[in-house]
Amino acid sequence: MNAKQIITALRAVREQKPLVLNITNYVVMNNSANGLLALGASPIMAHSRGELAELMPLVGALVVNIGTLDSSWIERMELAVALANRYDKAVVLDPVGCGASSLRTDTSRRLAEQAGRLIIRANASEIIALAGASSRGKGVDAQDGSEAALAAGRHLVHHYHADVVISGETDIILGESSEIRLENGHSMMPFVTGMGCTLSALTGAFAAVGETSGVAAAAVLGVAGELAAARSPGPGSLQLNLLDTLYQLDADTLEQCLKITVNRQ
Ligand SMILES: Nc1ncnc2c1ncn2[C@@H]1O[C@H](COP(=O)(O)OP(=O)(O)OP(=O)(O)O)[C@@H](O)[C@H]1O
Ligand SMILES: Cc1ncsc1CCO
Ligand SMILES: [Mg+2]
């Protein structure tokens, strides 16, 4: 994955405007839907047993985010993943707070086991916990750096046959034989709730146009976040400016700002 391929993928999202089905948490539904719209994709938030079977054939990808989990959500998530498998749709799993409670850890592992075409997007502490090691996460917030989650991330790639995005100050994106680092983003971004959830939603939009590595979404959100933060005095305006920046982001700016290192292709 290089800058040109990322730009091509962004163009594909804007042209195709893929429909992305999100089962996500109450905190971020609005941010995630707006993030997808600003990118150029088309969000639908749905979790009713009565409509998932009808919707799944129509969507480009499924995003499952366990942020505000309970038993009825778990049942819908399992149904949605089964349907995604039936229709050969990619599933982006955001295991929010994995490690904070056994409900979150066990559910994340079950969903990851179940999904056929899987991309896992999580912060370092969640990645470490999902892989079975003890992490230092505090609720939904990471306390570990991305490099500390590298071995865990590699384990997830092989165990679940997944692409894995470890997000944070450095985003590390792992595939079967690839390792890519992105140094974009801004230290103000973790002060806005659901930046990672937005990243997972955008990952779904890119997967829907065939970019299933997770790299393009992390690149676009990192660059847009960095540019937006530069003109935001605090997290409130950052949240709004991020949407404007995503909407306006052009190929030249993306290429100029991108800080990507491909360690293994
Ligand atoms: N310290 C940082 N410096 C630069 N960029 C950052 C930093 N922390 C996060 N980011 C940016 O924010 C994005 C979201 O990642 P983060 O790891 O914060 O998600 P998260 O912990 O899952 O968040 P949430 O659970 O609130 O959705 C990253 O891909 C990166 O672009
Ligand atoms: C704060 C919070 N709690 C559950 S989900 C969520 C949004 C960020 O992941
Ligand atoms: Mg998160």
Image (cartoon, rainbow, N blue to C red):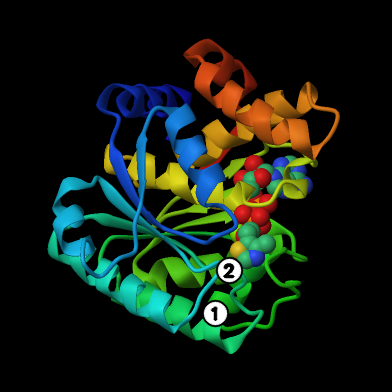
Residue at (53, 31) in percent of width and height:
220
Q: Quadrant of the image for the N terminus?
A: top left
Q: Is residue 105 visible?
A: yes
Q: Is mark 1 within 8 Å of ligand 2?
A: no
Q: Is residue 190 left or right of residue 73?
A: right
Relative to residue 214, is residue 77 drawn left or right?
left
**Label 2 near ligand 1 (CB < 8 Å):** no
Q: Nearer the viewer, residue 223 or 23?
A: 23
Amino acid type at image mark 2 = Ile
Give the residue at x 75% y 29%: 229
Tag 1 or tag 2, which sits nearer the N-term?
Answer: 1
Q: Measuring 70% from the left and 77% from the top, which residue is drawn there?
A: 135
Q: Secondary structure at mark 1?
A: helix
Which disc, if any, is residue 18?
none
Q: What quarter of the picture does the C terminus occupy? A: top left
Q: Is residue 7 above or below residue 118?
A: above
Residue 202 percent coordinates (x, y): 45, 42
Q: Where residue 230 sits: x, y (%)?
A: 78, 24
Do callouts 2 and 1 mark residues in contact (Cβ within 8 Å)? no
Specify the amino acid type for callout 1: Arg
Left or right, 29 with respect to 230, comes to left
Task: Determine crowd level at label 2: few under 14, some 14-19, many 20+ residues with C-alpha closer than 10 A.
Answer: many
Q: Quadrant of residue 117?
A: bottom left
Q: Is residue 123 visible?
A: no
Residue placed under numbered mark 2 in the picture:
127
Q: CA distance from mark 2 to mark 1?
A: 12 Å
Q: In x, y percent, where is residue 34? A: 50, 36
Give the residue furthest to the bottom: 102
| Residue indicated by mark 1 | 104
